[in-house]
Image (cartoon, helix red, strand yellow):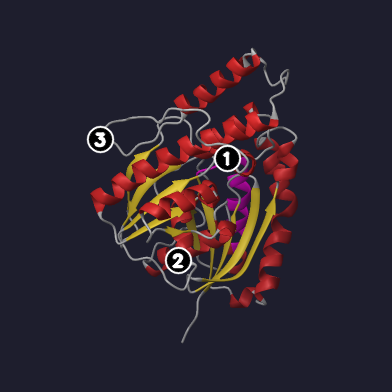
């Protein structure tokens, strides 16, 4: 039986990644060079720094992915790359590298939307989901409920109206004096806290809406910190001039996490009942949150969570979706492929 090996490249934000995916479901390699330590000192991703860091490591990451897969370029059948959305400088590094390799190595090229790819990370498993798939994608920049169909078309049924879930976690972590990235830091602090210590709001957008909103929740945490400390954190301009008791931090983290996750589950459950998909897939950085996994599985036991290692941006998911696109003849002309930071269409 003929096999197909796709070399995939991902550079949309602060991870430089490359993977070799066989037949759309087996990761022969999955290399991720993270920039978390670089950006942690700034409390968030600095676009210019991210782009320069991609330049420094992308060739080494690609070579490592081939080496770990025990393959050469002769074994690679196609190249896939994230074309958007993301930081434009970071995207350009990956796209230009992939275009050059595709032309020099004479390989087909497949451009991939990395937000769509989060759902297709679920195909890197023995039991692949069936279409139509309802996907909850929750990350630092995106929160969306989408229906994916057999022809790879996507129907967005709900999305964030303001902050993404991961963005809210990052901002709350900063308010509480926790480290970056905020998602893991808040979740860790919440383990020692009382989720009912503070009653934070959950946006009510109406029975017919599957959208999300986290700005009110984020503001409620800010006001609670202001009430506790007597200081307005929003007016500090990044200068920390207050100290919260560790138990208060834990209680605030647990209460915030409960409200944020409840909002995600509420809207996801509504959409699941409305659309009756054959599969529910949860991916993106926030999908690694254990509280979300436990609570959603209590309500929808058949929900498929992407493995934690594939929740953050990675190239394996890019290769998984690229394989599906290749099978449907969705190949990209290298001379026409462009990076798009605001890309919505696949």
Q: Secondary structure at mark 2?
A: helix
Q: Main secondary structure of the magenta part?
A: helix
Q: Earlier in the sequence, mark 2 or mark 3?
A: 2
Give the CA separation, mark 2 to mark 3.
Answer: 32 Å
Image position of 229 with respect to 70: above or below: above
Query: Between 175 and 79, which is closer to the camera in this rendering?
Result: 175
Q: Is residue 86 left or right of residue 233?
A: left
Q: Which residue is the site of mark 1?
A: 88
Q: Is residue 254 left or right of residue 211?
A: right
Q: Earlier in the sequence, mark 1 or mark 2?
A: 1
Q: Which residue is the site of mark 2?
A: 123
Q: Residue at x 67, y 38 (%)?
A: 180
Q: Earlier in the sequence, mark 1 or mark 3?
A: 1
Q: Are marks 1 and 2 in contact (CB under 8 Å)?
A: no
Q: Residues within 10 Å of mark 2 (few under 14, many from 20)?
A: many
Give the CA separation, mark 1 to mark 3.
Answer: 37 Å
Give the CA separation, mark 1 to mark 2.
Answer: 28 Å
Q: Which residues, given as a range, are shown in magenta?
A: 85-101
Q: Are marks 1 and 3 in contact (CB under 8 Å)?
A: no
Q: Are marks 2 and 3 in contact (CB under 8 Å)?
A: no
Q: Which residue is the site of mark 3?
A: 207
Mark 1 vs mark 2: in front = 2
């Amino acid at each position: 039986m003929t096999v197909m090996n796709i070399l995939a490249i991902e550079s949309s934000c602060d991870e430089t990644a490359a993977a070799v995916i066989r037949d759309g479901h087996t990761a022969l390699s999955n290399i991720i060079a993270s920039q978390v330590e670089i950006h942690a000192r700034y409390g968030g991703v600095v676009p210019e720094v991210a782009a320069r860091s991609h330049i420094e490591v992308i060739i080494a990451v690609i070579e490592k992915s081939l080496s770990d897969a025990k393959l050469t370029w002769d074994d690679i059948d196609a190249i896939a790359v994230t074309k958007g959305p993301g930081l434009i400088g970071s995207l350009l590094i990956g796209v230009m590298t992939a275009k050059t390799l595709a032309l020099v190595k004479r390989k087909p090229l497949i451009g991939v939307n990395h937000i769509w790819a989060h759902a297709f990370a679920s195909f890197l498993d023995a039991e692949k989901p069936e279409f139509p798939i309802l996907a909850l994608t929750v990350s630092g920049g995106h929160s969306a409920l989408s229906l994916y169909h057999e022809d790879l078309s996507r129907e967005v049924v709900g999305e964030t109206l303001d902050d993404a879930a991961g963005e809210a976690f990052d901002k709350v972590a900063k308010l509480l004096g926790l480290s970056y990235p905020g998602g893991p830091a808040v979740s860790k602090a919440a383990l020692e806290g009382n989720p009912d210590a503070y009653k934070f709001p959950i946006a009510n957008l109406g029975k017919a809406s599957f959208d999300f909103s986290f700005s009110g929740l984020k503001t409620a945490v800010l006001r609670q910190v202001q009430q506790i400390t007597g200081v307005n954190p929003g007016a500090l301009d990044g200068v920390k001039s207050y100290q919260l008791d560790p138990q208060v931090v834990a209680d605030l983290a647990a209460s915030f996490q409960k409200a944020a996750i409840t909002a995600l589950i509420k809207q996801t459950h509504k959409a699941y009942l409305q659309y009756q998909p054959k599969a529910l897939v949860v991916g993106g950085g926030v999908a690694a949150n254990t509280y979300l996994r436990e609570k959603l599985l209590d309500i929808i036991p058949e929900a498929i969570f992407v493995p934690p290692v594939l929740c953050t941006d990675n190239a394996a998911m890019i290769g998984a979706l690229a394989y599906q696109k290749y099978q449907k003849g969705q190949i990209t002309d290298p001379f026409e492929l462009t990076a798009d930071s605001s890309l919505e269409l696949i």
